[in-house]
Amino acid sequence: MTGTGKSCRSEFSAALLHAMEQDPRIMVVASDSRGSAALTDVFAALPNQCVEVGIAEQDAVGIAAGLAQTGKRVFVCGPASFYSARCLEQVKVDVAYADSDVKVVGISGGVSYGALGSTHHSLHDIAVMRTFPGLGVYLPCDRAQTAAITRMLAELRGPAYMRIGRDPVPDIYDDDHGITFTSGRACLLEEGRDCTIVAAGEMVHPAREASRLLRARGIRPRLVDAWSIKPLDQDMLVRSAAETGFVFTVEEHSIYGGLGGAVAEVLASRCPVPMRLLGFPDEWLPAGTSHELCRHYGLDAEGIARAVSGALTERPGQGSPGSRETP
Amino acid sequence: MCAETQVLTFPGECTSIHAAGRSPVRGDQMVSAADLEATARGVRKRLVRMIYEAQGGHIGGSLSCVDLLVSLYFGVMRYDPSNPGMSGRDRFILSKGHSVEALYCVLARAGYFPEERLSEYGSFGTMLHGHPTMKVPGVEIPSGSLGHGLSVGVGMALAAARDRARYRVYVLMGDGELAEGSIWEAAMAGAKFGLEGLVAIIDSNNLQITGSTDAVMKPKDLAGSWRSLGWVVQSVDGHDCEAITRTLRGLPLAHGCPTMIIANTVKGRGVSFMENQAVWHHRKMSAEEYEAALRQLESAQGGRPS
């Protein structure tokens, strides 16, 4: 990994600290997760805006909602695996249904925790979070985007879920503190006419590398960063599907109900085209680091490129008739 | 106590809340026990009618907590029904959200919305869902899934403590609800943060849908469980409005910790054939049962049905 040495979570905490200094209503709730969420400095700097509840995610989210209902603007932070499952009902009822101004920040999402195993993976979080009305779902892909989305969430009233990864990742966007993103607006990273690759979160980087490999082989994909999974940029997806005729989704998530599902739901009714959903299959994962796991399941640059070129050549009218089934 | 307690402790003004001219205080306008009991009787009649007309509702638990709600809303709490979001208001959370019919009747009577709207209960599209929602003026948080309310109350009381605001947060739970583990997470947090403004009340009627709470699941030592976690605990007759009001107005019982009021109650209180019968958790009334229930509530004297 050609990381810069700084992780998205440390970028998140720096942006959050800045926002908290500007707006004393912003509070952060942690559940023995200060280290995981890189919040140690925030707790030291602004103790009166920080709340430690111990290893109790349900309590953390309920307390966050209670604080928010008095006018606080609350970030509750901890491992994505736990915040998207253990306290899911509190997220549903106390945060989303109550329209509480709470941002649930899932740290070390997907298979970030790699070798720690499936208890610590969150390959279901997008699927469950995006079914709650009113709850935004965001997956930044690098440091600059993490900081920018954190700034956006600090301004945006209402409930949201943001998932970020654990380890340093390569930059996609310029590390410019002025960069902004608008909820519901995807980012077109590379133009292309042969197919569309839609990626989110830490899969954007391998998707971009895959795009380079494909270009060298004469295939020009369009690359879309769908960091705002809810609300989803439906118009850009429909336009891309119509203009390129084949859509691939790449996500660090189960192939059920995540980014691929969200894109398919839109295209099925507005612009049905062949699709392939690249993600983790419906099985418990073997032991391995996050990179080993991604490589094993074809979620590295070479695996994505292979899936794309294979599907395109198998497409009806493009050689041997291919299956339209998703992998 | 932890260092945080010092930051959070109330400045010893709690018993004088109602004398300090902190208007508007609905509670101060109706303080006689007779008034509270008459109100409770009216609420019972209204909720029985509401549930009968809707052909469904959690009648046993609603009847069980009427006197607690009436005492809170007409004898204790500070709020302004014409401004439900008033910043310094006391907060009430019905953690046992299935007793929603009692809450709706009390909120309507308190002036949050017209009492005629109670007739909408059970109809399509009404704001009066079968469990509390934020659409209803006066509801602070949705509830219905048990075990959520105390954490939310901790959050609200913690905000008050950090901001040095004086409002109180009241959380009403069922005794059957205590089997939810999340409550004990919140119990630890309330004590850790020294939330003197947090008042939890258990509607302890010893029944739940399956039967006796003793048989289903209950802490072996209810009061001791809370004491051991750092709460100050007081028991009260949950149908004695005068005792409830006096107890709640006398808080805090100790500084630097949250309060637990164990209210001893009777499920189905006020309707003889429903009292202490688990089947009346949410059983539908026949026309005859409805008439009999109303007759009993009409003839009850001073909120003390025979």
Image (tube, helix red, strand yellow):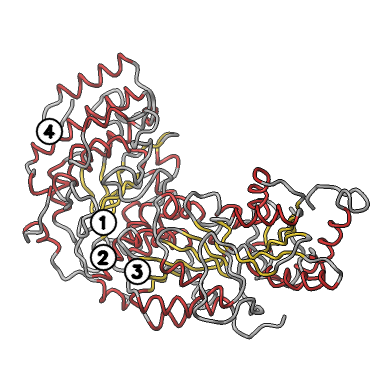
Any mark on residue B169, and which?
Answer: 1
Q: Give how far apart the Cα atoms at labels 4 and 1 are.
A: 26 Å
Q: Helix, strand, or loop for circle 4? A: helix
Front disc: 4 or 2:
2
| Quadrant of image for the C terminus of chain B | top left
Task: Check disc 1 and give the amino acid type.
Answer: Val
Asked whether, in this view, residue B80 is left or right of residue A3, the answer is left
Q: Amino acid at mark 2?
A: Ala
Q: CA distance from mark 2 to mark 1?
A: 9 Å
The chain identifier of the residue carrying mark 2 reads: B
Q: Position of residue B106 (x, y in %)?
A: 22, 38
Image quadrant assignment for residue B230: bottom left
Nearer the camera: disc 4 or disc 3: 4
Crowdedness near tag 3: few (<14), some (14–19) or many (≥20) residues, C-alpha within 10 Å = many
Mark 4 belongs to which amino acid?
Ala
Q: What residue is disc 4 on?
A: B38
- Which residue in the structure is indicated by mark 2? B160
